[in-house]
Amino acid sequence: MVIVGGGIMGMSLAHQIRRRSNLSVVVLEKGIGLGEGSTGGSSAITRQRYSRVENIRIARDGNRIWRNWSEYTGLPDPVGRFHDIGVLWMMDDDPAAVVRDCARLAAEGVDAVVIDADGVRERFPALSACMEPFDLTGEVEHVCRDGSAFLLERDAGYFDPTGALLDVRNAAVAGGADVRMRAEVVELRSGRGTITGVRLADGSEISAGLVVNAAGPWCNRINAMAGVDHGWELVPTRIQVIYRDLPPEVPRPLPVVGDASGGSYFRPEAGDGQIILGSILEEDEREEADPDDYNNAADRSWIDFKIHALHHRIPSLPYTGVPGGMASLYTVNRIDVLPVVGPTHVEGFALMNGFSGHGFKESQIVTSMMAQWITGERAAFDTDVPMEFLSIDRDPIAMGDLNVLA
Ligand SMILES: Cc1cc2nc3c(=O)[nH]c(=O)nc-3n(C[C@H](O)[C@H](O)[C@H](O)COP(=O)(O)OP(=O)(O)OC[C@H]3O[C@@H](n4cnc5c(N)ncnc54)[C@H](O)[C@@H]3O)c2cc1C
């Protein structure tokens, strides 16, 4: 089989196939290095609070893998590491709703607790527990008001995204997969309505019984080559992040924080010496027509806007140095914000597309579903969530939120 795209989805599928079968697997990646797509820009947060129980289970089962990374990859000394520093939800929700949400997570085996403002200060002394929406225009005087109920996922956090990508690539290659870089697929070969292989930019061809589209924000091009019209709206979407120095005088530990008052999330980065901050607001996403032509620098005005809310949440964070930023793409399914995964109506062609801001945490579980379907074999760490939940011919799923919080 051929996998088009060597991001976290494509490389992980190669590993998932080879750890359970001898099926020939070729991964074709157009980049000259790893992580040139969404995966390289990912914040790689592995929270489990979702509105749909299936998504909670996918994230929970994924965390089991991140926690046992060496055993799962078979690598004695993997590069990537799970930072299970906890995920704190500072959303100013109704306390009764927070308690209900916590019970929903606990029922699925997620280690979550509800804490109050003092609990936040005790565990994370750098954080303000204020939940008064921060007026970023500076026109309204801000008076702090403690929130009353915060949800803390204790067994979640983030993983090193490019470390994970390198590890699954190494695991796949060690398991016998053929991974080729600078290998851009420009055409799909077909005969009698069946996809039979691919043609590369250098003119070479590879035959395959199955071609899987794991091309991230470029997925629509590959689907068009296959003649697949699945009816879903998969849109390459620009999303920005900010980096700010996190000097030693800011008290540790810091968790991953979902912060409604700043419309953002943030977490420690770079060996705890930086903070990375991104947006949880749909208005900060921008649809892009061409994944090869977008502005990958963060907008100065957006950085200035968001950084003030971060300083309000972490009052001891000094205003020193110049915050940096960048923008990258993820692919949003505009119809129900869930990915589409599995076989298509075109024989010999399957896809894993449209992961929005969730694809990193879901990667090992989505590829577990795909590998079970492709090989008919089960392996340790497999999920029981059925692939039909994300299938192409499903009806749109009713979601709590139609945005990155979903
Ligand atoms: C800023 C940001 C923050 C995020 N934060 C989180 C988070 O906190 N938690 C989370 O779970 N997820 C997060 N995500 C989402 C997650 O990173 C993505 O959903 C995931 O990385 C998608 O992986 P992928 O393999 O499908 O795509 P990609 O990583 O884009 O990989 C696709 C690959 O296909 C290659 N390709 C494309 N066309 C061709 C072709 N014709 N021939 C050969 N190769 C081709 C590309 O070069 C690319 O490397 C975030 C994403 C971004 C951008």
Image: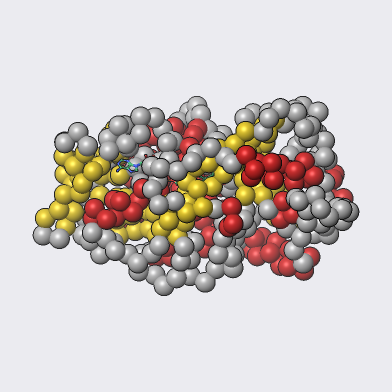
Residue 166, image x, y percentages: 44, 32
In the image, residue 46 sits, relative to residue 108, either above or below, namely above
Q: Quadrant of the C terminus?
A: bottom right
In the image, residue 193 sits, relative to residue 279, either above or below, namely below
Q: Quadrant of residue 303?
A: top right
Does residue 42 appear left or right of residue 371 in this picture? right
For the residue pair 167 and 313, the one nearer the viewer reads as 313
Residue 93, image x, y percentages: 74, 63
Residue 153, image x, y percentages: 68, 51
Does residue 323 appear left or right of residue 77 in this picture? right
Residue visible at 50% across and 39% down in the picture? 296
In the image, residue 248 sits, relative to residue 405, either above or below, namely above
For the residue pair 108 and 179, the one nearer the viewer reads as 179
Residue visible at 69% across and 41% down in the picture? 304
Residue 252 visible within the image: yes
* Quadrant position of ligand 1: top left
Residue visible at 34% across and 58% down in the picture? 342
